[in-house]
Amino acid sequence: MKKVVIVGGGINGLVSANYLIKGGYDVTIIEKKEFTGGACIKDSKTIDGKNIDFAYGATVLGMMPEFIFKETGLSKEIVGFYPKTPKLVYFKNEQASTKIFQDSIELEKELKNKWGEEGRINDFRNDENKVIRFIQKLYKDAITPTTELAYEELGKELSDLWIFGTAKNLLDHYFTSEKSKLYMGMTVIESGPASIYDPGTAFTIPLMDSGSVFDGYWGFVKTGIWKIAENLTNINLSLGVKINLNSSISKVDTQSKLISYTKDQNKIKLNYDHLIFATDPVTPSRLIKDFKQDIELDEIGTSGKVTAFFRNPVIWKDSNNYPDSFRFIFSNNSLSQFENASQNALKNSGDYFAGFIQIYPDGSAQRAMDNKEAYDKIILFTKNLSYDKKADDLDKIKDEIINTVLPYIENADDLVYSKFLTPKDLNETFSFPKGNIDHITLTGKQNYNKRTFSNNPSNFYSYFDFHDVYYCGAGSFPCGSVAGTAGYMCSKQLIRNDR
């Protein structure tokens, strides 16, 4: 029985371990922290003697494929919920929302009425779905993403527009309204401040809708998203995966296939046949003793979040009949303003350049899943923060973010506590390079077939030219988030290579 050692117990490491143990391998996970989950973990706060748990890093579930959710056994353990109601969008100085309906015909009417949109919304959705189906097929079949395959499956026109093109060209192709372009294009910078003029940035738009556990939408997990990691850890343990927590690796010898690490002050050496790094991308380069190559990373994150707690359920002044809906508040009215804010944050030329705030109604969603908690909570995911400072140094910025949202809430006085995380906090807590909350890019900006360290496209998840060393952590195709797709695809490639 071949031995696989996986470094990192985050979602990709856990998913990879699940498929490999069921594929007949001896699997060991080495995790430096005292818990698994990576950035999919919980925090807790006691308010007036009442305890409430909340998501520390990742908050919502959206990019996980349904087949991973089922095949790992998670579907038997996890209760999920996603809003069927429209998303609600507000622009600067607007109190009434524009509704982003799931139905294209309703959406077309709404955008024409509210934003003067004269473009081709149905064509946008239809073409996006073609690209999404292509991406999802890559996931399921664990096929390496290549330029040739995109052209073969989608044709040159769609591929150049949706996969290899710029976000600016894609949005201009379908829409006439700046507000439409801004809303549809916000995902381009959701994880990092990529320029909308960079080749390959168009791909991020279908990518962020390519998860199928909630039919392409984003939703919530009963109790909290950390239950994904907790349950998958227990499932893996029951299957025979060995998990070593609080373990510090000192060296990886790829010639003798030997890992040296310390656990509970005991020095241990472990042999492997295959080694998988499900970590941040810098860790392998630090541990492999004969590593001599440069790593090219586009690694600055500008995302942060505020978790706000209310004594009573939040009452929205507008559309309170949609308490479960995601809401968006934009501080910019055009793509050019949005681009400037993003790029100013990238340059670290200020603490905060207001872009958009995405509001996750976590407490309302928990009630919809019959999980009644002591306090209501909403999460304010925001752009564009500098990397230089921690939350403790940015009280004014925290107040600015909260005060942007409170005017939309009837019972704003019920706010009792808030927790702020900046990119620097995220870097120190989760080892995200430069604080990226979701994923980073490895090479080639956001280009889909460049999210790899491999010099051999046929062995996409290999770590440079090291034999039997793989990488499936943050940034590798498809991207980060609580999806596990990279871990799945990596494990499938490893198994195929052994045949």
Image (tube, rainbow, N blue to C red):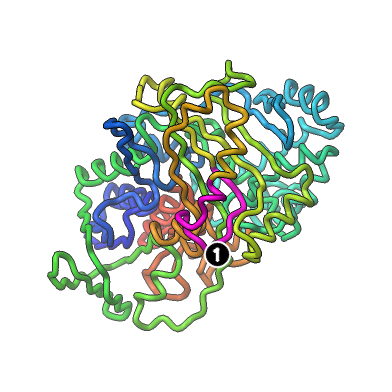
Q: Is residue 103 visible?
A: yes
Q: Can you tell which quarter of the image residue 117 is in?
A: top right
Residue 355 spot, x, y in % from top left = 67, 47
**How many numbered marks are there?**
1
Name the residue located 50 percent from the left edge and 27 percent from the top edge.
Answer: 413
Name the residue located 19 percent from the left edge and 42 percent from the top edge.
Answer: 238
Tell me if 71 is positioned left or right of 247 in this view: right
Instruction: Name the quarter where the C terminus is drawn.
Output: bottom left
Mark 1, residues whose alpha carbon is within 10 Å: few (<14), some, or many (≥20)?
many
In the rendered view, tell whether residue 385 sits above or below residue 101: below
Q: Is residue 16 visible?
A: no
Q: In the image, what residue type sits under mark 1?
A: Glu
Q: Is residue 153 magenta?
A: no
Q: Label 1, on which residue?
A: 299
Q: Can you tell which quarter of the image residue 45 is in?
A: top left
Instruction: Name the quarter where the N terminus is drawn.
Output: bottom left
In the rendered view, tell whether residue 252 sits above or below residue 399: below
Please tell me which residue lies in front, 348 or 106.
Answer: 348
Tell me if 376 is positioned left or right of 208 in this view: left
Point out the stretch of residues depicted in magenta. 381-398
